[in-house]
Image (cartoon, rainbow, N blue to C red):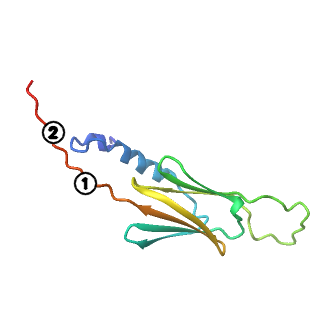
Amino acid sequence: MTKLTLGSYPHMLGFEQLERLLERTAKSGNEGYPPFNIEQTSERSYRITLAVAGFAENDLSITVEDRQLVVRGRQRDDLSDRVFLHRGIAARQFQRSFVLADGVDVGDAIMENGLLHIDLTQTLPETIVQTIKIKRG
């Protein structure tokens, strides 16, 4: 069985980037940690909220790489002088990725009560009508 790609369809010109985006999204396979919410805060704005209890602002990094929002967390290991009788709270690192559509910009990031809020806004491209002149060959 052959794999059909968007390039196989003659009326779908220039959609190779969309195909790569879908493949990248499928590969991102985040395990579910940390848990997150995505909410629509207005007609063209969104908020991603990640539960990052135990992480300080210095333990977190937020970057946009190739239209992909990447949130990384790594807690500092300052436990050398502490003795645990039971350790049920894991201090594990994470990486959570979100693919952004064209026109979606990352705004503020706010840490509040163990929750990291990242605001996104979407700008709509203006409609452009272009007339192509036909030349004589």
Tally the numbered discs: 2
Seen at 45% across and 55% down, the residue is 100
Residue 88 location, quadrant: bottom right
Residue 127 marker: 1
Residue at 47% from the left image edge and 48% from the top image edge: 24
- Give the residue displayed 40% in from the left and 61% down from the top: 122
Task: Please name the residue shown 22% across and 40% down the image.
Answer: 10
Quadrant for the N terminus, please.
top left
Which quarter of the rendering shows the C terminus? top left
> Is 72 left, or right, of 132 in this rendering?
right
Question: Percent position (x, y) of residue 26?
Answer: 46, 53
Q: Crowding near pointer 2: few (<14 within 10 Å), some, many (20+)?
A: few
* Residue furthest bottom in the image: 113
User: Outermost residue toward the top?
Assistant: 137
Residue 95, image quadrant: bottom right
Q: Amino acid at mark 1?
A: Thr
Q: Report helix, strand or loop for mark 2.
A: loop
Residue 7 at x, y = what percent? 29, 40
Residue 19 - label: none
Indicate the secondary structure of the residue bearing disc 1: loop
**Residue 130 versus residue 33 in the image, above or below:** above
> Depth check: 23 or 122 in front?
122
Sequence-first disc among 2 and 1? 1
Q: Which residue is mark 2?
A: 132
Instruction: Give the side of residue 13 with respect to residue 51, left or right.
Output: left
- Judge the density around disc 1: few (<14), some (14-19), many (≥20) Cα neighbours within 10 Å: few
**Disc 2 marks which amino acid?**
Ile
Residue 81, compared with residue 136, is above or below; it is below
Percent coordinates x, y for residue 129 in the rendering: 20, 49
Structural distance between the alpha carbons of marks 2 and 1:
16 Å
